[in-house]
Image: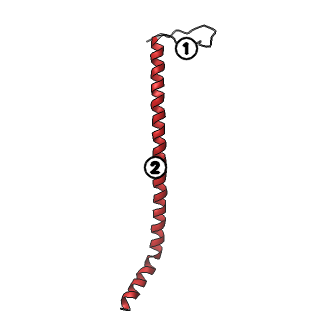
């Protein structure tokens, strides 16, 4: 286990580790934060695309429901049209 020293200086850096290991840790934290931001951006794009697809699906289902409602009437008209030939 690595022991961490704390600074007792009065410049606001109390509790912050110092040294090359601390710099490496800060760099790793920065790298991981960057990855999280990139992932968040990608998830936002995917959520937007999913919302578009859901809206399109809802519209298509509404159209199919309307066509199904009018389906029997159109079938009767087609039959009437064939009988008059």
For this rendering, which residue is in front, 14 or 48? 48
Which quarter of the rendered picture does the N terminus lie within?
Answer: top left
Name the residue at 47% across, 23% down. 29
- In the picture, measured across the screen, residue 47 lies left or right of residue 13, that is left
Q: What element carries label 2?
A: helix
The residue lying furthest to the bottom in this view is 84
> Is 44 situated above or below 23?
below
Q: Is residue 65 above or below residue 58?
A: below
Distance from Cα at disc 1 to Cα at disc 2: 43 Å
Residue shown at 45%/26% (left/top)?
Answer: 31
Q: Which of marks 1 and 2 is nearer the N terminus?
A: 1
From the viewer's side, name the closer residue of 11 and 77: 11
Residue 53 location, x and y as percent? 45, 54
The quarter of the image holding the C terminus is bottom left
* Label drawn at residue 58: none
Residue to which mark 1 is pinned: 16
- Which residue bears the numbered disc 2? 49
Instruction: Give yes or no for contact between labels 1 and 2 (Cβ–Cβ under 8 Å).
Output: no
**Alpha-carbon neighbours of circle 2 within 10 Å: few (<14), some, or many (≥20)?**
few
Residue shown at the point (49%, 48%) measured from the top left? 48
Residue pictured at 48% horizontal, 28% vertical? 33
Vertical placement of residue 85 versus 4, above or below: below
Quarter residue 77 falls in: bottom left
Q: Quadrant of residue 28?
A: top left
Percent across and percent down for residue 18 are 51, 11
> Where residue 52 sits: x, y (%)?
48, 53
């Amino acid at each position: 286990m690595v022991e961490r020293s704390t600074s007792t200086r009065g410049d606001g850096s109390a509790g912050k580790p110092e040294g090359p290991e601390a710099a490496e840790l800060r760099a790793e934290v920065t790298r991981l934060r960057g990855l999280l931001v990139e992932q968040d951006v990608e998830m936002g794009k995917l959520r937007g695309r999913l919302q578009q697809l859901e809206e399109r699906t809802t519209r298509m289902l509404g159209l199919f429901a309307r066509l199904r409602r009018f389906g029997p009437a159109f079938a009767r008209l087609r039959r009437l049209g064939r009988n008059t030939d």
